């Protein structure tokens, strides 16, 4: 059996495994979806659970259709030889190493976006509207789409042109220079995003509830964390979904509250949610995650350097010759296959961080009941699946299931 057949079999195995996990999760939801968890009775009822089940099933069916189409395209592109035709066409457009490389990735990105657009449109204006979440207009949706495409293409152009330039400039150590560039560029984006990118999509304004802001700043001072400001964002222009997050790093760091969250929760619940988010900063989860990502990136670039120098990547697909950008596509494909079995480990680490943040938030706010109440409200308001299959949750969930988190918080409150 040749390498092409082996790769295709492994790819189909990974894809089938993902679909099987999705299937057992949905079947589990159908079986247990009407069960109101203990302690959720004041916020969640069977009508909400029935709506949650229907919402989850519709979203999953749409995601499945998009996934099937993407997988079919991948199979034809990589295993059907289309990558060779595409590669030759790109090379005919320009003899410049950098320009042809930029065109290679930019056109691929545009094609991927075009495939996603009808699914995103249907999701927003059919599913999200049907369940009372969507508030955006078609004009605003299109405006956001064009902004996203332009920003993505700008960032992609900078990254690809810089990467290819570094490869051409330092053929022996490009993997190290390239890694350093991506580290600096990612940090740069984290700094400018709150000032340049986020305001292109949302309107930020000072928080209207002065008493809430005072409580938040008092909690920040207690935790010895400096934030530049606390703002609210007009998320309700697009959706009724709610959220809160920290934005930026260093002195640029700010707290952003969705206006939908401010309407749905009490001040005590908002404080509890922010105390949890603050736990990620104080426990060093952001820093640890960045270090892990950059370490893996460095090893990946070093491995990519040697695999490209080996010269056998086109042969894995029974091809004789491909350009450097096309070989990078093969590397990214191989990387996705390698990462899939590691997904449960990554999910477990993330859930562990969430538990630590929950504990820190409870210690800081002194109100585990408020965090439990906030999680229950978020679940009901966002129609979150309260009954994921345990194996599916252990494989994919970055947060512990809501019922598990609430039970832990209630136990913590009794122990405290």
Image: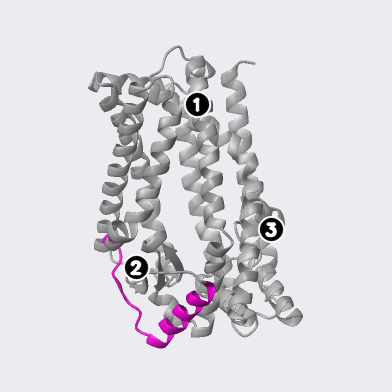
Residue 205 quadrant: bottom left
The answer to whether one can see residue 314 in this image is no
Tell me the quarter of the image containing the N terminus: top right
Q: Secondary structure at mark 1?
A: helix
Foreground disc of the pair 1, 2: 1
- Residue at which label 2 appears: 238
- Range of residues picked out in magenta: 200-223
Residue 271, above or below 80: below
Of residue 370 and residue 75, the one placed in the foreground of this image is 370
- Between 204 and 61, the one lying in front of the other is 204
Q: Residue 212: within the magenta?
A: yes
Q: Residue at x 44, y 65 (%)?
A: 246
Q: Seen from this angle, which residue lies furthest top?
A: 320
Within 10 Å of disc 2 (Cα), the crowding (few <14, some 14-19, many 20+) is some
| Residue underneath mark 1 | 304
Image coordinates for residue 390, horizontal then vertical, percent: 71, 58
Quick one: quadrant of the C terminus? bottom right
Q: CA distance from mark 1 to mark 2?
A: 41 Å
Q: Is residue 286 magenta?
A: no
Report the magenta stretch's main SS.
helix
Query: Visible in this render: residue 134?
Result: yes
Q: Is residue 225 positioned above or below 413 on the image? A: above
Question: x, y percentage for residue 399?
Answer: 61, 61
**Regarding mark 2 in the picture, which secondary structure is present there?**
loop
Q: Which residue is mark 3?
A: 389
Instruction: Tell which circle, 1 or 2, labels the residue nearer the N-terminal end.
Output: 2
Number of other residues with Cα within 10 Å of mark 3, as a class: few under 14, some 14 to 19, many 20 or more? many
């Amino acid at each position: 059996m040749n390498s092409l057949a082996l790769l295709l079999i492994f790819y189909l195995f990974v894809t089938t495994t993902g679909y099987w996990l999705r299937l057992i999760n949905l079947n589990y939801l159908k079986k247990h979806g009407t069960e109101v968890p203990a302690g959720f009775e004041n916020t969640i009822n069977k009508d909400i659970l029935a709506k949650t089940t229907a919402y989850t099933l519709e979203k999953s069916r749409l995601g499945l259709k998009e996934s099937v189409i993407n997988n079919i395209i991948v199979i034809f592109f990589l295993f059907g030889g289309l990558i060779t035709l595409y590669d030759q066409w790109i090379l005919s457009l320009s003899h410049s190493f950098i320009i042809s490389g930029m065109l290679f990735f930019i056109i691929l990105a545009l094609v991927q976006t075009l495939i996603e657009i009808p699914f995103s449109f249907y999701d927003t204006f059919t599913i999200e509207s049907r369940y009372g979440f969507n508030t955006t207009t078609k004009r605003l949706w299109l405006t956001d789409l064009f902004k996203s495409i332009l920003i993505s293409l700008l960032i992609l152009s900078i990254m690809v042109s810089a990467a290819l330039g570094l490869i051409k400039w330092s053929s022996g150590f490009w993997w190290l220079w390239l890694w350093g560039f991506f580290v600096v560029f990612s940090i740069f984006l984290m700094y400018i995003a709150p000032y340049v990118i986020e305001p292109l999509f949302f309107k930020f304004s000072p928080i209207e509830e002065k008493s809430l802001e005072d409580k938040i700043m008092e909690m920040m001072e207690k935790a010895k964390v400096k934030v530049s400001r606390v703002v609210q964002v007009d998320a309700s222009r697009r959706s009724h979904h709610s959220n809160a997050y920290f934005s930026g790093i260093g002195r640029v760091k700010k707290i952003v509250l969705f206006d939908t969250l401010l309407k749905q929760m009490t001040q005590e619940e908002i404080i509890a949610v922010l105390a949890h988010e603050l736990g990620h900063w104080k426990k060093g989860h952001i820093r640890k995650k960045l270090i892990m990502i950059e370490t893996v990136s460095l090893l990946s670039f070093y491995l990519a350097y040697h695999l490209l120098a080996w010269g056998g990547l086109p042969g894995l697909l029974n091809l004789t010759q491909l350009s450097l950008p096309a070989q990078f596509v093969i590397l990214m494909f191989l990387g996705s296959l390698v990462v899939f079995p590691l997904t449960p480990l990554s999910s477990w680490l993330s859930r562990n961080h969430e538990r630590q943040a929950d504990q820190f938030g409870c210690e800081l706010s002194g109100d585990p009941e408020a965090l439990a109440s906030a999680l229950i409200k978020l679940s009901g308001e966002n129609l979150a699946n309260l009954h994921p299959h345990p194996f599916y949750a252990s494989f994919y969930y970055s947060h512990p299931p809501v019922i598990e988190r609430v039970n832990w918080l209630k136990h913590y409150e009794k122990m405290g």
